[in-house]
Amino acid sequence: MRLLKLAHIDTLTLNVFSWAALQPSEDTYCFGKLDKIMELAKRHGMKVCLATSTGAHPAWMARKYPEILRTDFYGRRHKFGARHNSCPNSPVYRKFSVQLASKLAERYQAYDNIVAWHISNEYGGECYCENCEKAFREWLKKRYGALEEVNRAWNTSFWGHTFYDWEEIVLPDQRSEHIDEEHTVAQAISLDYRRFNSDSILECFRLEYDAVKEYTPGIPVTTNLMGAYKPLDYMKWGKYLDFISWDNYPSNEDSVSQIAMNHDLMRGVGGNKPFVLMEQTPSQQNWQPFNALKRPGVMRLWSYQAVAHGSDAVMFFQMKRSIGSCEKYHGAVISHAGHEHTRVFRECAALGAELEKLGGEILGSTVQAEAAILFDWENWWAADYSAGPSVDLKYHDEVLNYYTALHRQNIPVDLVCEEDDFSKYKLLAAPVMYMTKPGADERIREFVEKGGTFVTTFFSGYVDENDLVILGGYPGRLRDVLGVWVEEIDALPPHKKNRFSYQGQAYEAKLLCDIMHLEGAQALAGYEEDFYAGSPVVSRNSYGQGQAYYVGTRSGEDFYQKLMADICKEQQIQPAAKAPEGVEVTRRVRGQEEYLFFLNHGEGNACFEIPRDGLELLTGKACRKGEVMELEAKGVAVLKNC
Ligand code: GLA
C-alpha cells in the first residue's frame, strides 16, 4: 500500500486468477483472504476493479468434471493446466463460473469503492469437444432453421457434403475440414464455426454479467479485450460490455500506427466512447521471443498515446513480480528488489503524479473523426480463409496499410462496423471488403449518393455472408457504385511486381492485380507491365453527390499516403494538427473544450508551430498560436484550447 501510494496508483484490479483459492472444493468457498484485501484497499482509499476469477478453473473441478476441459483443434482433450482452459459450452463450467460471480457480487456489493467488474480474463481460444459439437448444431438450427438451408448456405453439394441429419454435422477441425489451422476446404463451415465459437464465449461473459448485475446493477461491467484479436468478433462483443477495456502489449518493433490502430479499433468496438487501458507492462513482457525493455520515456509516451486515442485510465499488469512460474520475469511496477528505487518504479510514479494533477480534466472527452475505416471480423475470417488467390493476402494487413496512410498524416480515424452510422463521415475506406452482408451495399450506396467518399480495393464485393460468390461479376453488389467490373485477378509471387503511375509518380503494384473494365468510372492510373499493361488499376466513379474509389492492387506506403492525402485535401478532411514526421497528433473533444495531444515518437527533439492559443496541461504553460514548441524525444504535450 505504501508503494502503491508512492506511485500514485488509485485503482487496483483484484482477484483475477483466484478461483482455486476462493473455492477449494465443490461445496467450500473461502473468501477470508479476499475479504482482507478488500478491506485493506478500502481503508487506503483505493478503488477496485474486481475480477470474477473465472479465467482459470481449479484442478479439482477438472478432475471431477473432465467435460470442462477443452479439446483442441487437433482433437486432443486437454488435461488440467494453464489458463483460459474451460470449454465455453460446458454446462458445468457455466454453472460454476456464474455461481462464483454471483457469490462475489453478493459478498462485496456494499463496497462503494468497486468501480468496475472485470469478468474472467482475456477471453479467447476455441474448443472442439463433443459439448461444443452439440451446441454447434443447436446454433445452426437457430441460424438456419432447416437443414436444407444449411446445405444451401454451405454449398454442400461440393465434394459430396450434403447433410441429411443434424447429427451428421461435425466441427471443422484438423480431423475434418481443415488442412491446418488457417486453411480449410469448407470456408462456409469454418466461418460459421468462428461465429459460433465467438458467440459461445460471449455467452459465458453474458451469464456472468447478469450474475453480477443482479446484486450490483450500478457497477459497470467489462472484460479485458486484446486489440485485433482474430478469434472473437469484438464488434459484436462491444455491444454487451458496459465499457471497453483492453490490454496493450506491443513489441518495440511494432509501428506507431499499428499501436494507434489497436486503440482506435478498441474505441470503435465500444461505439467510440472512452475506453480503459486495462493492462500494459511498465517495462517488458515475458512471452515475446525477445523481451526488450521499454526505453526511458516510452512507457509514459505509450500511456499518453492510449489517452490520446480515447482511454480514460492507464493501468498496468503487473504490480509486483511473482516469485514463480512463467510471469516472474514479466515487467512490474515493483521489481524483485521489492522497493521503489528502480527506474521503472520512478517512471510509473512520475506518470502517476502527472495523471493525478490532470485529474478529471480529459475524462469523458471523445475523439471525433471525419474519416472511418471499416473493420469487420466476419470479413476478416472469410477473406483469410479464402483458398486463393494468394496466401499472402491478409485482411488485417490491408486495413493497416490504409490506416497507416491516414494516421501518419495525423488524420483522426474511427474504426467502424457495417452497422455504424456512416453519415457522419466524409470518407469511408473499406479495404478488402470481401464479404458484402445483406444491406451493406445499400448503405454504402446511400453514403456515396449523399456526398460521401468511399474507397475500396481488390478482393471486395465477392461473397455474401455465407462465403457464397455473388454472381454477375466482381465486385458484386458494389459494381454500380464503383463503376468497374473486375474480370480477372492476377496473384503475384513476392518477387514479382507490376507498376503504375499516379499523378506523375511511379508506384509498385504487388500481391494482387485486378484486371478490370471501367463501367462509368474514370481511370486514375493504369498498369505499365505484363499482358494487361494499359488497363486501369485505380479508378474513381462519381455516384450521386459522392465519389467511389477502387484500388485494384496492393501498392506501397508512398502510394497510400498520396492517395489519402489527395482525397483528404479534396474533401477538406483536416489533420488534428500539423506536425513534423514522427510526431503523432490526436484530438479529444468535449463540448467547446478541445485537447490536442502531441506525442514525439522520434529519437530526436521535434519543433513545430503551436496551432492555437492554449494551455499546455502537463507543464501548466500558456502557449500562443504561432510560437514554436520544442518537444524532446519521447516527449508529450497536451494543449487545451482557451
Ligand atoms: C495478459 C493477462 C495477464 C498477464 C499478461 C502478461 O494480458 O491478462 O494476466 O498474463 O497478459 O503480459
Image (spheres, grey):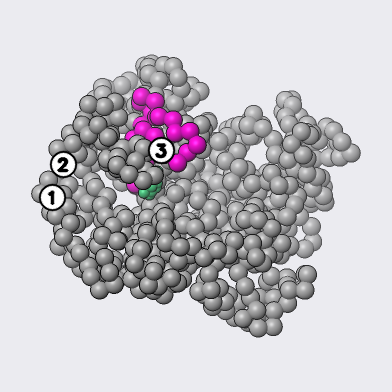
Residue carrying label 3 = 285
Q: In x, y percent, where is residue 328?
A: 34, 41
Boundaries of the magenta span: 275-299
Q: Secondary structure at mark 1?
A: helix
Choose top left, top right, bottom left or bottom right for residue 621.
Answer: top left
Identify which residue is drawn at 55% across, 36% down.
404
* Mark pair 2, 1: CA separation: 8 Å
Q: Quadrant of the N terminus?
A: top left
* Mark pair 1, 3: CA separation: 29 Å
Q: Is mark 1 within 8 Å of ligand 1?
A: no
Q: In this view of the protein, which residue sits in the foreground, 385 or 449?
A: 385
Residue carrying label 1 = 40
Q: In x, y percent, where is residue 458?
A: 71, 47
Horizontally, residue 66 falls left or right of residue 216, namely: right
Above or below, 359 against 143 in this view is: above
Q: In this view of the protein, which residue sits in the foreground, 603 or 529?
A: 603
Give the crowd class for mark 1: few <14, some 14-19, many >=20 residues within 10 Å.
few
Q: Secondary structure at mark 2?
A: loop
Residue carrying label 2 = 1
